[in-house]
Image (spheres, helix red, strand yellow):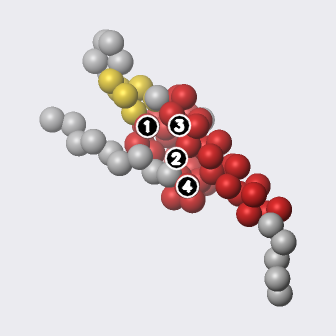
């Protein structure tokens, strides 16, 4: 039985991508699945749930942009 990998989110997801992207040698599907966004295809193989993966990255991007635009008090 295959162990279900918990989906990385937020800073954990972006940090994982930054640290491990070279290990996957340009194979975005493998990176996506390793980050927990794998789904079972009709043929039984695991593939990337691209829409969910992109949504998680987009949310992180929006949060980063919002925090960057917030005024800082020093």
Alpha carbon separation for disc pair 1 and 4: 14 Å
Question: Which residue is denoted by mark 3 in the rendering?
Answer: 53
Taking the image as shown, residue 10 lies to the left or right of residue 40, namely: right
Q: Position of residue 26 (x, y in %)?
A: 60, 35
Alpha carbon separation for disc pair 1 and 3: 6 Å
Question: Which residue is denoted by mark 1 in the rendering?
Answer: 37
Q: Residue at x 15, y 35 (%)?
A: 1
Question: Which residue is denoted by mark 2 in the rendering?
Answer: 23
Comes first in the chain, label 4 or label 2: 4
Is residue 28 positioned above or below 7 on the image?
above
- Whether residue 73 is visible: yes
Is residue 44 positioned above or below 48 on the image?
above
Q: Residues within 10 Å of mark 2 (few under 14, many from 20)?
A: few
Dividing the picture into quarters, in which one does residue 38 lie? Answer: top left
Q: Position of residue 34 (x, y in %)?
A: 42, 43
Taking the image as shown, residue 23 lies to the left or right of residue 60, namely: left
Nearer the observer, 70 or 35: 70
Question: Which residue is denoted by mark 4 in the rendering?
Answer: 10
Q: Nearer the viewer, mark 2 or mark 3?
A: 3
């Amino acid at each position: 039985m295959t162990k279900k990998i918990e989906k990385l989110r937020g800073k954990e997801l972006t940090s994982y991508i930054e640290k491990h992207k070279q290990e996957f040698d340009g194979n975005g599907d493998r990176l996506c699945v390793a980050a927990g966004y794998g789904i079972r295809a009709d043929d039984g193989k695991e593939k990337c749930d691209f829409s969910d993966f992109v949504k998680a990255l987009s949310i992180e991007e929006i949060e980063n942009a919002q925090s960057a635009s917030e005024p800082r008090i020093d």
